[in-house]
Image (cartoon, rainbow, N blue to C red):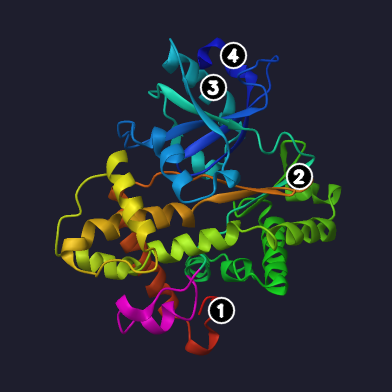
Amino acid sequence: MLTDTLPTNWSYVSEGGESIVFSYKGPDNPLYTGTVLRLRKCSLTNRNPPNAEAVVFHEEIMARLIDPTFLPKIQHVHVGQGAELWLNALAALCEPQRPLERKRTDRIDSRCQNAALATDLVGCEALTIEIKPKWGFLPSPTHLSEATQPIKTRTCRFCMHSHLKAQPSSFCPLDLYSGEECRIKKALEGLWEVWLDSDGAINNFRVFVHGKRISSEESSSISKEATISALLGILTTSPVLRTLSRLQRTLDALDIEGLATLWNAADVGGNPTVSEWHEFITSYLSSPNAPPPATPEHLRYHVLAYLLSATFKDCSIIVGIASRTVTVIDLALKSIDRLSKWEQLDREILSAYAAVPVQDRKICVDAAI
């Protein structure tokens, strides 16, 4: 049980929208040494009850879609007696290290009774890079409106979203996913520039030296040229980016626009159970490139497909430079409640980008087209 350790035995590493990660730094322990602890977070304003289905999502669902070789080894652990007190103590310890924007919106969910332990992918290497690849494709024009089709099929979602957030960069995910060495190198150089310019505030690119995340101010301790060269050699030979792009693309056959048209005509239902996920995966794997028709009777299939695609669009990869390994992390289960928020965000992104003169719009090249 986690409460057999001290909160001070755990060191803050990083966090995403769904969870927060700590590395074990306590006395040698056969269960915890060499592991990281992943804890669920909750909103400061809307503390939804814990989703028990998320506990087995990774090991039962993701392993059917991604070769387990490229997934972290995860085991579940009970927090133990006095869980809320222990988790609140850990939350207080890490609060000074958390990004300001995260502290304003969420915290460790102190009601959690279970947590996940995974292999410490950054603490066991001299140099480790975390990359959030983002969306790796342009949508099919089939289910887009006349107004959005010429925009969405020309400029990728990430680049349009960057415009909305006033965070322009030379990085385009389609370059990273392209499979072409020169374009992947361009993407990596763009990520490095974003890391330097933002002082690491943008989470697309993180650098860890001996398990410690370093800021861009400390970049002189590592060689840009050597690091990008090593990353290039690893990513061009690994199947991981191709797998992520394929899953994103084939699971998002309708775009949020086409999906919204369907759910306006039928009830989307609640969050799927693990059993329903298994049924969906079996159906998807039987014909991943030939989804069912975009009709209300097939709405549930397309909703689950979109939720999975969203997971793969938001995941990260950990690249071990010395071990030449690529591991997919942050494969969090997405809630069906987010669908309407995603549709609204899509509208905001398109509205902002439509105001850009046509001649100034970025052209993103999808290698699969």
Residue 297 in the image, given as x and y percentages of width and height: 16, 62
Q: Which residues are magenta?
A: 137-156
Secondary structure of the residue carrying numbered label 2: loop
* Mark 2 residue type: Ser
Task: Measure the C-alpha gap from mark 4 to mark 1.
Answer: 50 Å
Closer to the observer: label 3 or label 1?
Answer: 1
Task: Measure the C-alpha gap from mark 1 to mark 2.
Answer: 31 Å
* Mark 3 residue type: Leu
What numbered label is drawn on residue 6?
4
Secondary structure of the residue carrying numbered label 3: helix
Q: Nearer the viewer, residue 101 or 281?
A: 281
Task: Measure the C-alpha gap from mark 4 to mark 3.
Answer: 9 Å
Task: Measure the C-alpha gap from mark 3 to mark 1.
Answer: 45 Å
Residue 270 on the magenta span: no
Estimate how packed mark 2 is, as few (under 14), some (14 to 19) or many (20 or more) residues with alpha carbons within 10 Å.
few
Q: Which residue is mark 1?
A: 365
Of marks 4 and 3, which one's residue comes earlier in the chain? 4
Of marks 4 and 2, which one's residue comes earlier in the chain? 4
Q: Residue at x 52, y 76 (%)?
A: 368
Predominant secondary structure, magenta span:
loop
Q: Residue at x 65, y 71 (%)?
A: 170
Q: Is residue 21 rendered to the left or right of residue 256?
A: right
Closer to the observer: label 4 or label 2?
Answer: 2
Q: Contact (CB < 8 A) between labels 4 and 1?
A: no
Residue 138 on the magenta span: yes
Q: Contact (CB < 8 A) between labels 4 and 2?
A: no
Q: Which residue is mark 3?
A: 90
Estimate how packed mark 3 is, as few (under 14), some (14 to 19) or many (20 or more) residues with alpha carbons within 10 Å.
many
Task: Measure the C-alpha gap from mark 2 to mark 3.
Answer: 31 Å
253 is higher (above) or lower (below) than 152: above
Estimate how packed mark 1 is, as few (under 14), some (14 to 19) or many (20 or more) residues with alpha carbons within 10 Å.
some
**Which residue sits furthest front?**
286
